[in-house]
Image: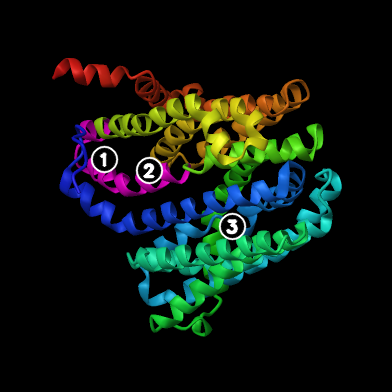
């Protein structure tokens, strides 16, 4: 596969790193397409009101996902790379840590619901969704196959699980089942993945019953991951709090319509993570060998993020009404909100690249401050804009919050240069300079 010429990137190195994550990318794209098709069918069947009710319950799970996962995933991969002989101890310790965190989240979610309930969403639904936090502990197997550079097995599990999930939901629609059936179905999605991970791991000659818990390793992992836990909580807040707030301020129907906006706009947000994971090892090699080339590659990475996200934002802005005509006419009035919300993706792409730079340079705490800043901006703007503008206010608040978070580095002298580099990419200045040089 030939990648278009990008100054600063080595084609052979690019292909080498891409092969390590290509199968995971294919799996995510396949899963995305399946989910989009099924979400269209579910949205049409449930209507705005009932879709808003179910979305309210799912939102609580997202808000606590950072606590349930403990920010361990990337550290599991790192530990497995460094100490492959300790596989059973690393996986066992991580698994039981996640199970414990998932159980601890259940009373925390109940407390959150008592303080700020989702109007119209019964707590029974929230409780059913709460079990997801425990089941996701089996995702440690995903990290294991990543460390073994065997992402094809994860792809197989994800695509198979999503196909079964899609079939179940389509059967529920055909049988005209009540809303509670879909609550169980969405929760069962995570059980399907867990079952798939388990049998795939066992089939490859491994045995989960050999996993052991190591308290010393648990302390080490927790010391490494706690900044990412806090950062993840902030990310969850500024990514999902708008959906909960719009449900409480504007009602379940408005929340249901806005849920379609968020799902369509955020469906592609996994792409920058995959691309950055693919390219950043090559960029780090340049940091070790040639600082000037390292800076150029960082600029090229920001350029690439804009080249990918900007055209998509422009296209969807002008086709949002057509998308909803195909998606479902009942939600057509949400098209203008989608035209605004989609631009937040540009800042998601840039922010993903810049976060890797901050981590590489040892500025992990800055990732926490920037996400916290974004969360505060989003909550404050939602409080002001949603009562006046409904879902359009939520879309504007999300866009400003994502932009504020991405360019927070401009306020920090030691990394402000990175903010300027992102602005150069965003306004296509570096692109024009490359064209002039040629």
Residue 70, label in figure: 3
Which of the labelled discs sits on residue 427, or is there none? none
Residue topped by disc 2: 360
Which residue occupies 52% across, 68% down? 217
Q: Earlier in the sequence, mark 1 or mark 3?
A: 3
Instruction: Tell me whether the residue at label 1 lies in contact with that at label 3, contact meaning CB atoms closer than 8 angstroms.
Output: no
Picture residue at 80% right of the left edge, 32% below the top = 249
Q: Is residue 310 above or below residue 181?
A: above
Q: Residue at x 24, y 43 (%)?
A: 288
Instruction: Give the magenta-colored segment's residue range.
Output: 269-295
Label 3 or label 2, whichever lies nearer to me, is 3
- Tell me the number on the disc at residue 287: 1
Badge 2 marks a residue whose secondary structure is helix
Is any part of residue 64 visible from this angle?
Answer: yes
Rendered view: 172 above or below 269: below
Residue 256 pos. (x, y %) = 71, 41
Of pointers 3 and 2, the one earlier in the residue sequence? 3
Quadrant in which residue 335 is drawn: top right
Per the image, label 1 sits on a secondary structure element best described as helix
Q: Is residue 116 left or right of residue 154?
A: right
Whether residue 79 is visible here, answered yes or no, is no
The secondary element bearing badge 3 is classed as: loop
Position of 374 with respect to 269 (left or right) is right
Q: Are marks 2 and 1 in contact (CB under 8 Å)?
A: yes
Asked if the stretch drawn in magenta spans residue 141, the answer is no
């Amino acid at each position: 596969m030939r990648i278009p010429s990008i100054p600063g990137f080595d084609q052979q190195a690019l292909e080498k790193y891409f092969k390590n994550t290509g199968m995971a990318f294919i799996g995510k794209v396949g899963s995305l397409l399946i989910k989009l098709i099924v979400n269209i069918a579910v949205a049409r069947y449930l209507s705005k009101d009932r879709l808003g009710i179910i979305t309210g319950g799912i939102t609580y799970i997202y808000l606590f996902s950072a606590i349930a996962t403990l920010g361990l995933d990337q550290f599991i991969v790192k530990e497995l790379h460094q100490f492959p002989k300790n596989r059973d101890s690393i996986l066992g310790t991580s698994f039981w840590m996640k199970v414990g965190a998932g159980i601890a989240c259940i009373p925390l979610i109940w407390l959150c619901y008592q303080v700020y309930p989702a109007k119209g969403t019964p707590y029974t639904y929230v409780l059913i969704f709460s079990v997801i936090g425990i089941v996701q502990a089996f995702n440690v197997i995903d990290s294991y196959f990543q460390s073994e550079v065997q992402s094809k097995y994860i792809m197989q599990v994800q695509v198979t699980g999503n196909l079964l999930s899609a079939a179940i939901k389509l059967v529920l629609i055909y049988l005209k089942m009540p809303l509670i059936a879909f609550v169980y179905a969405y929760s069962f999605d995570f059980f399907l993945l867990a079952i798939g991970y388990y049998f795939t791991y066992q089939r490859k000659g491994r045995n989960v019953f050999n996993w052991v818990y190591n308290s010393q390793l648990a302390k080490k992992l927790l010391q490494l991951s706690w900044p990412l836990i806090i950062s993840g909580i902030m990310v969850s807040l500024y990514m999902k709090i708008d959906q909960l707030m719009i449900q409480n301020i504007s009602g379940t129907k408005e929340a249901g319509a806005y849920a379609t906006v968020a799902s369509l706009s955020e469906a592609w947000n996994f792409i920058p993570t995959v691309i950055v994971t693919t390219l950043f090892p090559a960029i780090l090699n340049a940091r070790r060998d040639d600082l000037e080339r390292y800076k150029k590659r960082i600029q090229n990475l920001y350029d690439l993020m804009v080249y990918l996200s900007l055209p998509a934002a422009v296209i969807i802005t002008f086709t949002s009404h057509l998308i909803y005509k195909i998606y479902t006419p009942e939600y057509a009035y949400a098209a203008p909100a989608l035209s605004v919300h989609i631009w937040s993706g540009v800042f998601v792409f840039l922010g993903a690249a810049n976060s890797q730079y901050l981590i590489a340079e040892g500025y992990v705490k800055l990732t926490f401050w920037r996400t916290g800043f974004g969360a505060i901006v989003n909550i404050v703007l939602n409080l002001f804009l949603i009562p006046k503008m409904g879902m359009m206010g939520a879309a504007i608040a999300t866009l400003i919050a994502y932009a504020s978070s991405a360019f927070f580095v401009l306020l920090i002298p030691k990394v402000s240069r990175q903010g300027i580099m992102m602005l150069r990419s965003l306004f296509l200045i570096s692109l024009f300079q490359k064209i002039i040089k040629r």
